[in-house]
Image: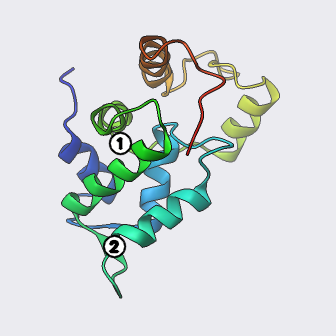
């Protein structure tokens, strides 16, 4: 499988459109596992509002890259290129049913569902763990600005 480029990931999240709305922006960050208790959906919405043009409702690819730069600033230990790599690893939106989500929550976030198959996020989780290890294994105590 070829590595997804950033523009391919952008188009996958937007449904092959040229612009991304705020809901899709948050979904993109959530699927790339860039949101946590320190960098929340509110922070993502504020970044989206700051980078989009006045009166605009959507952002284009260049503005998307600028917004990823803002995300990298929030994660002190990551560069913009690393944030872009994480988005490329997410590659496309991931959807799950309520039953699958409930099953995952019952199992405390384990990577197997009741039927025994691997979750779609496993490659992303593995890459994220490698990236965290490369950044000094500060997985729990990362500081945000």
Q: Residue at x 54, y 12 (%)?
A: 137
Q: Name the foreground residue: 113 vs 88.
A: 88
Mark 2 lies on a secondary structure that is loop
Image quadrant where residue 32 sits? top left
Pointer 2 local density, CA inside 10 Å: few below 14, some 14–19, many at least 20: some
Check whether the beta carbons of the residues at disc 1 and disc 2 lie within 8 A of each other. Answer: no
Is residue 59 positioned above or below 27 on the image?
A: below
The residue tagged 2 is: 52
Q: Residue furthest right?
A: 106
Q: Quadrant of the N terminus?
A: top left
Image quadrant where residue 51 sits? bottom left
Between the C-alphas of marks 1 and 2, the distance is: 22 Å
The residue tagged 1 is: 92
Residue 97, image x, y percentages: 62, 45
Q: Residue at x 33, y 82 (%)?
A: 56
Residue 126, image x, y percentages: 47, 15
Residue 88, image x, y percentages: 30, 35
Q: Name the foreground residue: 37 vs 58.
A: 37
Q: Residue at x 49, y 46 (%)?
A: 74
């Amino acid at each position: 499988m070829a590595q997804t480029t950033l523009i391919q990931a952008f188009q996958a999240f937007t449904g092959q459109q040229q612009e991304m709305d705020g809901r899709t922006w948050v979904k993109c960050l959530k699927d790339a596992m860039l949101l946590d208790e320190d960098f929340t959906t509110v922070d993502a919405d504020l970044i989206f509002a700051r980078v989009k043009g006045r009166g605009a409702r959507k952002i284009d690819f260049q503005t998307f890259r600028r917004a990823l730069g803002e995300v990298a600033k929030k994660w002190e230990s990551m560069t913009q290129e690393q944030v872009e790599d994480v988005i490329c690893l997410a590659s496309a939106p991931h959807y799950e049913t309520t039953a699958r989500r409930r099953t995952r929550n019952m199992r405390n976030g384990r990577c197997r569902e009741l039927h025994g198959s691997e979750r779609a996020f496993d490659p992303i989780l593995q890459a994220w763990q490698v990236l965290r290890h490369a950044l000094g294994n500060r997985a729990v105590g990362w500081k945000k600005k």
